[in-house]
């Protein structure tokens, strides 16, 4: 398995990456923003993405997105092909994209939003902390990316204050002294189920 910083030669993988994200969103049912092949193609070309290849077979992907004039960067679109899951690949990709973010944007805060426990665990181990959305970028372009998520109405209803996703932030210098920690999975599961009962119940009652 090779983990590579993507370049133009990887544009041919844009379609399978987009399809794998769409399929996974359907299976998971919790809402993942859609990413078109054209959107993925741009991320493959600009030197801000990591692709994992098994020979020439697509195995995994993640990209860096810059927001608020480089004040923030997000590590987004993490996807591992179903054939390569549960072997620690996402963890390796996350670590590599995190290192790349630190190298290329040393002054930026790194953040992500997710409903996935796996991603929360990995972020937490890298030193991210759960935060309210008010701590994240207010760049409207970032939040526009949520429009294709099936929970977008919740984000709109709460005036972008909260949604089913949890915001997680790595605040550069503040986190330097963080020693590897284990995530409290129970707390995250509980938070997710509280949000689901709160928001999804309201929705059906309307
Ligand atoms: C989420 C995903 C990227 C994980 O990829 P993976 O290569 O199987 O993950 P890893 O094997 O590296 O596991 C990393 C950690 O997450 C945990 N994990 C993996 N899948 C999990 C799941 N479905 N639920 C809870 N924890 C999970 C692993 O146990 C591991 O934790 P540990 O170090 O404490 O053992 C992959 O399942 C995927 O692509 N899913 C669909 C897309 C998605 O949900 N992307 C995130 C959008 S926010």
Image (cartoon, helix red, strand yellow):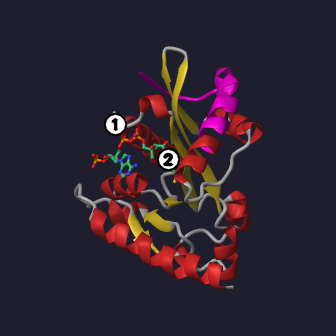
Where residue 64 sits in the image (x, y, percent)? 57, 47
Indicate left or right for 98 with 125 as reference.
Answer: right
Residue drawn at (34%, 62%) of the image: 175
Q: Residue 101 shows which numbered tag? A: 2
Residue neighbourhood size for the residue with mark 2, other residues' Cα within 10 Å, grouped as few (<14), some (14–19), many (≥20): many
Q: Is mark 1 within 8 Å of ligand 1?
A: yes
Indicate left or right for 43 with 169 as reference.
Answer: right
Residue drawn at (48%, 34%) of the image: 82
The magenta segment? 1-21
Residue neighbourhood size for the residue with mark 1, other residues' Cα within 10 Å, grouped as few (<14), some (14–19), many (≥20): few
Q: Nearer the viewer, residue 29 or 58?
A: 29
Q: Secondary structure at mark 2?
A: helix
The relative height of residue 107 versus residue 83 in the rendered view (above or below) is: below
Q: Nearer the viewer, residue 186 or 132?
A: 186
Quadrant of residue 143 in the image? bottom right
Q: Residue 169 shows which numbered tag? A: none
Residue drawn at (67%, 39%) of the image: 43
Q: Main secondary structure of the magenta part?
A: helix
Where residue 71 sits in the image (x, y, percent)? 58, 62
The relative height of residue 42 versus residue 142 in the rendered view (above or below) is: above
Q: Secondary structure at mark 1?
A: loop
Question: Which residue position is annotated with label 1?
Answer: 88
Where residue 25 sits in the image (x, y, percent)? 59, 49
Location of the N terminus by quadrant is top left
Q: Nearer the viewer, residue 67 or 159?
A: 159
Whichever of callouts 2 and 1 sits on the residue coming sooner in the sequence is 1
Where residue 60 sits in the image (x, y, percent)? 51, 33
């Amino acid at each position: 398995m090779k983990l590579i910083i993507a370049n133009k030669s990887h544009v041919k993988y844009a379609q399978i990456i987009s399809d794998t994200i769409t399929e996974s969103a359907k299976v998971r049912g919790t809402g993942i923003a859609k990413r078109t092949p054209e959107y993925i193609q741009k991320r493959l070309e600009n030197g801000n993405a990591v692709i994992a290849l098994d020979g020439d077979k697509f195995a995994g992907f993640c990209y860096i997105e810059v927001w608020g004039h480089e004040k923030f960067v997000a590590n987004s679109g993490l996807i591992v092909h179903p054939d390569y899951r549960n072997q620690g690949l996402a963890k390796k990709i996350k670590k590599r994209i995190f290192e790349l973010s630190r190298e290329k944007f040393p002054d930026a805060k790194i953040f992500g939003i997710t409903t996935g426990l796996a991603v929360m665990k990995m972020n937490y181990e890298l030193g991210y902390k759960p935060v309210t959305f008010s701590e994240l970028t207010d760049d409207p372009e970032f939040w526009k990316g949520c429009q294709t998520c099936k929970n977008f109405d919740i984000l709109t209803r709460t005036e972008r204050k909260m949604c089913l996703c949890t915001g997680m932030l790595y605040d550069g210098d503040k986190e330097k002294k963080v020693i590897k920690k284990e995530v409290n999975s129970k707390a995250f599961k509980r938070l997710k189920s509280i949000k689901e009962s709160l928001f999804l119940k309201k929705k059906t009652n309307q």
